[in-house]
Image: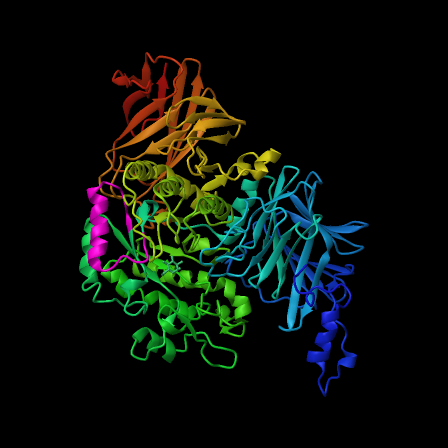
């Protein structure tokens, strides 16, 4: 199962014998008495015991705990010698019991822990654990019992779980892996890694999300292996009949998450690990970044050009060169003599300033952040009590232990000055943690781990998440009722509660455009919906076509930012001249037009755990060919896009799930359930809208808040069946939504041969300022003669040259009938 045969003995491999010679001999403890290291397997359960929603089974030595979490989620833990670790998880902050009917049945051959929906079977002969639904369909079963093996270097255990892999089983999830969307046949590692210019199939990358979704015979289930140590997953790579996951330490602890739909699994994974908080609406606009925009005059020139060229933009980023010698929380006064004035003036032009912060704190006794950290012993220490030092941008650095709550609080407060200067967002980088030369910290670095203690082996994968948590919580406190914006490179499951992410240092190539598309879909179904790629590619040089195609994909990435490395040519939306500038503008404008739609999809994510970007397989999981589709995806549940991913294309094949779809550009109505050839010259890309949808649209703005919204355009796409749409509105930048001050609107569209009814219902305490909707009815199959709104006839409507029906309505109408 592992590359090193010391760790994978079935019997005793030769290398192990050598090890015993070299390492086990000790004068007081002759190796003669030491048993060879072999994998140990659970044998057979000899006892069963229940304590509330926890069930314990023992084979006389090892113990297994089965916890019923909800009707559809069961957690499994293994204690090789009967002693479980304290309950603690950075990923699952609170494990609430949300189930009332559950119990244990003892049958002749097995024990069954059951809920109303699922069963967990523990086989009496060999401790095999399996799960089934209430139709007795086995969704997941052990291929061998859970096992472990002494980790001689560490003193703990490797822990393993091996499940049966079925011949047509597909696998999805796992965060930001740079490979095909379907993970069948792959072996992947979780160990957060700074992977500059990563390649296709390179692994591991920046984040660790030990969560996968299996799809077998059309039924989905998920496994979340909540273990922060270096871990591996094998999806039928070594043996096509087995799926395994194992870690180099920690507890074998996993959650079985029932489907049957992929969407159910993803929603339930969010129930455990949380969702993104609502972002400030401006964070959903376009962001411009570069390593680095400096000095101030350069920043001003770039921002001025956006306004002159009328290309919308909300975020402008300062990369490491804004600092004094790369010391976090300082300014290079030569480049930025008066940051407060600059940020204020940028903000008057509608730009929010986002600054980068790295975890490496320069060792410098004249630098207050270092001094404070040193005096309070906030930096990470080696086990022999020296502070851990490593080189990053500022030179020799020490690193805060973000797993210590006191350090997080200190770190959070350090942002006070930046916030007072007007900084609106913080970009958390290099937090895998990255160290030049060695890659990362040595394993023996000690972490406080919120009182649970841990070496870097245990804390490595959560370090970045705890850094951005410290940042987010600090900003949240300092900014009071304003929503902070944070972005992070590293993360672990649950990082979404604190931050958005980008996929790291990608490359300006078509292959990376393909990868970026897959990685965003994958992140989105792995809990991290608020994600995006460096548009244009971080390293290397895109040509105008590649950049424009990337802008098009970015228009439909929940996070939209162009970024590039310092040694590349200028990379703004106008850098490639015409026709690229105009096309880029058109798509960035489209991003702003669709903001209320994206914002509503974000709410559905935040409140209900839906991913924002959804691969096609999530819509039609029963269709085996969909398991391998990775180009097209839906943005929310109404808009399907298919980015153009190769040079020189004028059209491309697009698969549409079953149902009726409108071509966004031409309004042509097409039937789904098949592939179509769709025109895709550079100035366009395939976009389809589900029939029956109501898509809200804002007027084009140069930045969020530029204009008071006077009316919202409602694009209604006629359907001859009933369809629901959902729109969310609130203040856009405060936490009032946590006090239930928001509005959820539901539209029901019902079409007949010569009649269309649109009903609106609303729930919530928020009142938008605008008064009217501009209704834009698309695809009406008849010529309207009479329009009745809440029992009053509306005479004032227009049929436009593109056959759409246009009319104005009061925003709180309840029923519109068109005959
Ligand atoms: C890292 C980041 C990149 C950033 C650079 C300089 O490579 O991934 O986005 O621009 O560091 O700070």
Q: Residue at x 41, y 26 (%)?
A: 663
Q: Nearer the viewer, residue 454 or 812?
A: 454
Q: Using the rendered image of the protein, determine whether residue 622 is visible from the camera's viewpoint.
A: no
Measured from the top left, where is residue 234 in percent x and y? Answer: 64, 53
Question: Does the magenta segment cover residue 305?
Answer: yes
Range shown magenta: 289-315
The correct choice, above or below, for 761 with respect to 214 in the image is: above
Q: Nearer the viewer, residue 585 or 719?
A: 585
- Quadrant hosting ligand 1: bottom left
Instruction: Tell me which colouring the rendered structure shows.
Output: rainbow
Measured from the top left, where is residue 499 in percent x and y? Answer: 41, 54
Would you say 791 lies left or right of 241 here? left
Q: Nearer the viewer, residue 231 or 219?
A: 231
Measured from the top left, where is residue 57 in percent x and y? Answer: 72, 59
Q: Residue at x 29, y 79 (%)?
A: 366
Q: Nearer the viewer, residue 259 or 167?
A: 167
Question: Does the magenta segment cover residue 306?
Answer: yes
Would you say 69 lies left or right of 672 here? right
Q: Using the rendered image of the protein, determine whether residue 301 is visible from the camera's viewpoint.
A: yes
Location of the N terminus by quadrant is: bottom right
Measured from the top left, where is residue 270 in percent x and y? Answer: 50, 49
């Amino acid at each position: 199962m592992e590359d090193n045969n010391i760790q994978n003995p079935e019997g005793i491999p030769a290398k192990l014998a050598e090890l015993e010679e070299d390492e086990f001999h000790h004068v007081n403890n002759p190796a003669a008495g030491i048993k060879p290291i072999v994998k140990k397997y659970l044998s057979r359960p000899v006892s069963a015991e229940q304590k509330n929603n926890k069930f314990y089974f023992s084979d006389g030595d090892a113990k297994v705990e089965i916890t019923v979490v909800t009707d559809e989620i069961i957690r499994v833990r293994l204690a090789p010698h009967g002693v479980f670790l304290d309950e603690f998880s950075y990923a699952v902050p609170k494990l609430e019991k949300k189930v009332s009917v559950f119990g244990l049945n003892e049958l002749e051959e097995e024990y069954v822990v059951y809920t109303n929906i699922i069963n967990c079977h523990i086989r009496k002969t060999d401790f095999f654990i399996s799960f089934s639904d209430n139709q007795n369909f086995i969704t997941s079963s052990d291929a061998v019992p859970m096992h472990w093996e002494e980790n001689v270097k560490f003193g703990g255990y490797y822990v393993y779980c091996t499940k049966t892999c079925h011949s047509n089983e597909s696998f999805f999830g796992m965060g930001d892996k740079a490979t095909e969307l379907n993970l069948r046949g792959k072996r992947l590692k979780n160990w957060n890694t700074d992977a500059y210019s990563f390649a296709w199939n390179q692994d591991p990358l920046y984040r660790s999300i030990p969560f996968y979704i299996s799809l077998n015979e059309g039924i989905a289930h998920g496994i979340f292996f909540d273990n922060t140590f270096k871990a591996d997953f094998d999806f039928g790579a070594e043996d096509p009949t087995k799926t395994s996951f194992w870690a180099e330490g920690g507890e074998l602890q996993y959650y079985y998450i029932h489907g049957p739909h992929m969407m159910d699994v993803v929603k339930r994974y969010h129930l455990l690990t949380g969702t993104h908080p609502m972002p400030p609406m401006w964070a959903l606009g376009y962001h411009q970044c570069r390593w680095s925009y400096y000095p101030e005059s350069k920043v001003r020139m770039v921002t001025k050009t956006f306004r002159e060229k009328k290309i919308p933009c909300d975020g402008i980023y300062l990369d490491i060169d804004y600092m004094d010698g790369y010391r976090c929380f300082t300014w290079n006064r030569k480049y930025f003599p008066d940051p407060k004035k600059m940020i204020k003036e940028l903000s008057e032009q509608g730009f929010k300033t986002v600054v980068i912060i790295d975890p490496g704190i320069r060792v410098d006794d004249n630098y207050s952040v270092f001094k404070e950290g040193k005096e309070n012993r906030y930096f990470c220490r080696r086990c022999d009590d020296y502070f851990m030092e490593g080189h990053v941008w500022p030179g020799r650095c020490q690193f805060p232990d973000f797993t210590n709550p006191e350090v997080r609080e200190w770190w959070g407060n350090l942002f006070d000055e930046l916030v007072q200067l007007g900084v609106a967002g913080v970009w958390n980088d290099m937090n895998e943690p990255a160290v030049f030369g060695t890659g990362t910290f040595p394993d023996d670095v000690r972490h406080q781990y919120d009182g649970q203690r841990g070496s870097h082996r245990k804390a490595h994968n959560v370090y970045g998440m705890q850094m951005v948590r410290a940042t987010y919580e600090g900003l949240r406190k300092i900014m009071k009722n304003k929503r902070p914006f944070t972005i992070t490179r590293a993360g672990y499951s649950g990082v979404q509660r604190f931050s958005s992410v980008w996929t790291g240092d990608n490359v300006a190539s078509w292959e990376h455009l393909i990868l970026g598309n897959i990685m965003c879909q994958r992140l989105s179904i792995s809990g991290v919906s608020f994600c995006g790629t460096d548009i244009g590619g971080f390293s290397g040089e895109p040509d105008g076509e590649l950049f424009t195609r990337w802008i098009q994909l970015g228009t439909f990435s929940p996070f939209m930012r162009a970024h590039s490395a310092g040694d590349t040519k200028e990379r703004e939306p106008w850098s490639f001249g015409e026709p690229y500038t105009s096309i880029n503008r058109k798509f960035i404008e489209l991003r702003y037009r669709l903001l209320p739609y994206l914002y509503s999809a974000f709410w559905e994510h935040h409140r209900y755990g839906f991913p924002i970007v959804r691969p096609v397989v999530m819509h039609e999981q029963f269709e085996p060919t969909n398991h391998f589709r990775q180009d097209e995806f839906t943005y929310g549940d109404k808009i399907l896009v298919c980015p153009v991913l190769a040079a020189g294309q004028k059209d491309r094949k697009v698969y549409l799930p079953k149902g009726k779809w409108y071509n966004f550009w031409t309004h042509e109505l097409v039937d789904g359930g098949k592939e179509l050839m769709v025109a895709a010259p550079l100035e366009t890309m395939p976009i389809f809208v589900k029939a029956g949808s109501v898509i809200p649209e804002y007027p084009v703005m140069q930045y969020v808040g530029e204009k008071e919204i006077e009316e919202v355009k409602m694009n209604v796409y006629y359907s001859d069946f009933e369809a629901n749409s959902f729109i969310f509105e609130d203040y856009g930048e405060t936490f009032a939504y946590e006090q239930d001050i928001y509005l959820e609107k539901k539209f029901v569209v019902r079409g007949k041969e010569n009649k269309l009814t649109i009903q609106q219902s609303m729930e919530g305490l928020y009142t938008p300022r605008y008064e009217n909707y501009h209704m834009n009815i698309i695809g009406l199959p008849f010529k309207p003669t009479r329009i009745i709104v809440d029992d009053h006839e509306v005479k004032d409507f227009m049929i436009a040259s593109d056959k759409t029906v246009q009319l104005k309505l009061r925003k709180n109408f309840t029923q519109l009938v068109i005959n």
